[in-house]
Image: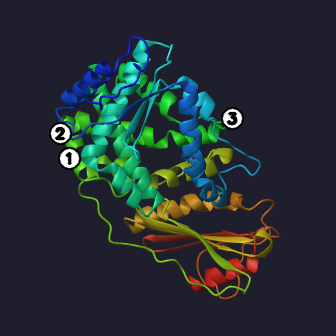
Amino acid sequence: MPLPLLEPSPTPGFTLSLAGTLAREVAQARGLLSRWETPLTPVDAYDLSVVLYRRYQTMPPFPLSEQALLEIVGVWPPDLEVVPDPVTQAQVAPALYFSDEEQLYVRRDWSGDMSAIRTIVAYSYARALSDQYGDFPRLLAESSSLDRKLALEALAQGDALLSLWLHEGVTPSSPKAEALTQAVAATTLPRWRTPAPLLDRLAQLPLTLGSTFAETQYSTGGAALMDEAVRRPARATRQLLEPEIYTTWNTQLVFDPLTVDLERDWTVGHSETVGAALMTFIFAEWGNPSGITPTIAGWNHDLLQTWEGPEGKRVVLWQTAWDSTTEATAVFDTLVQLVPSRLPGKITLTLRPEGVHWGRWWSNAEGAVYLYRVTNRVWFLWGDDIASVESVARALQ
């Protein structure tokens, strides 16, 4: 139930008391009790656009927040310049809830369909309920890897969607449930000043992953099974991709960044655990031009790291581990098809350089690519400075 505020009603026909009723109904539909009240602030479209603008200045929305990583792996088009459009998002949003603030903003000047504002306010209270039981704001703030953040955000969004579906009396995975999910996406996902289909698809990744997971959990064991997942928050996106191993999956493996002495002008750059969900997206983007369908199964851990050199030179190493040699071999074979296209122009050399005894090598005047597998581990190395790529490849032997 929201805090009683001495401000005008959010919008004609939608009152603060109705907001409180929705909060109680959502909790009852999920069979839970709200642990604390969620502050509600009535705003107009301009106020909401200012709130969004200030947030995006300090916290760019996903996937804009990961532009550097997406550029490194080559899926961010080099000429793509994207700026969030808080004005448009504020105009189409009847309400918005921000998890890190635990704050709900409701449009007092909303002139659209009343069912839209009821749906989004109900979803907002559902997300607030998820945050209370899953402690997601704290866990997200403390997460040290992109994969963990995506897993937590997907779990929270999926749990909130399940509460919304139950509140609206619709069956998860039904067309009506999908319509509600798309209504949430249309309101909560960022808008851009110029068309950006890649970012639109990526922005929806946590919501899609979470909704699919919630559907599976509910069909398998009802809301109680989803409650168990929230009480044991995911550590990796793989757990949501494979719900059947959610509670049993565990990995003790952690990759340390590789230490290599390159030339004096080179520095250590980006380091990130990408995870199964985003890795699947990236590999699919790599395979699109050639129609190759990537094989990604059995992810165990990964670490992507870079070295930055003079004149914009860069070397990238992606260390990956898989459940078994069989799965690692399948990934290796997929990458053999995909990675030559990481080099612009025609491949001129496939002979491994001196000191590199194993793996596959491709190079030309633009750079080099190297693939190496040992049992259940696969290393993928590429860069536009051949000598530096060779140095890192030798360090892997």
For label 1, the residue is: 228
Name which residue lies at 68% across and 45% down: 289
Foreground tag (3 vs 2): 3
Label 2's element? Answer: helix
Do the CB atoms of the residues marked 1 and 2 lie less than 8 Å apart?
Answer: yes
Q: From what the image shows, is residue 227 above or below residue 42? A: below
**Occupied quadrant, residue 362:** bottom right
For label 2, the residue is: 224
Disc marking residue 193: 3
- Place of residue 382 in the rendered image (x, y in percent of width and height, measured from the top left): 66, 69
Say few, some or many: other residues with alpha carbon within 10 Å of mark 2 (under 14 / 14 to 19 / 20 or more): some
The first of marks 3 and 1 along the sequence is 3
Residue 228 shows in the view: yes
Q: From what the image shows, is residue 139 above or below residue 49? A: below
Name which residue lies at 51% across and 13% down: 111
Q: From what the image shows, is residue 353 above or below residue 160? A: below
Spatial distance from mark 3 to mark 2, Cα to Cα? Answer: 42 Å
Give the residue type at disc 3: Arg
Spatial distance from mark 3 to mark 1, Cα to Cα? Answer: 40 Å
- Place of residue 223 in the rendered image (x, y in percent of width and height, measured from the top left): 21, 35
Foreground tag (3 vs 1): 3
Give the residue type at disc 2: Ala
